[in-house]
Image (spheres, rainbow, N blue to C red):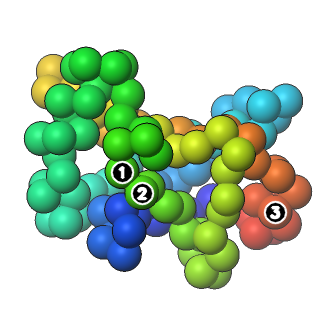
Amino acid sequence: MKGFLYIDNDKLGEVDFKIVDEGMGGIGGNLIANDNYRKYQQVIQGNYEKNGISNTGDFNFRIMLEDNTEIMPQGGIGVTDSVEFDEIYVESAGLDLSILKNNNS
């Protein structure tokens, strides 16, 4: 399912989310970053180097689905972006996956 990653009201790009852990309500996917992402990338990569991830404790990450539904994960939202790789991975857990399954059908 298509979603968009935000920090506050800045749209950072698009993610094609897949369910990665049904039991934990987990989704994940690669971010197709836009120019706004570059404003935050150095700090996100620094958080990754220090903590292994940049998460909602570092930024007010938000995920909006294609139909403008904002998902509210109990486990937060994390972004993995290493200077050593070209991929930027977004993950979230603690979701009611029925919302996502209904959105995807």
Mark carried by residue 99:
3
Instruction: Quote the CA–CA distance across marks 2 and 3.
Output: 22 Å
Task: Please say if the residues under marks 2 and 1 sit with CB atoms less than 8 Å apart.
Answer: yes
Is residue 28 at least partly visible in the picture? yes
Q: Name the outermost residue toward the bottom.
A: 67
Instruction: Give the x, y percent position of residue 74.
Output: 70, 46
Q: Quadrant of residue 2?
A: bottom right
Instruction: Give the x, y percent position of residue 76.
Output: 58, 43
Instruction: Residue at 18% x, 30% y: name it.
Output: 46
Task: Please say if the residues under marks 2 and 3 sit with CB atoms less than 8 Å apart.
Answer: no
Type of amino acid at the residue the image marks with label 1: Phe
Instruction: Quote the CA–CA distance across marks 3 and 1.
Output: 24 Å
Relative to 90, 72 lies left or right: right
Which part of the image, by quadrant, shows the C terminus?
bottom right
Q: Earlier in the sequence, mark 3 or mark 1?
A: 1
Residue designated by label 2: 60
Mark carried by residue 24:
none
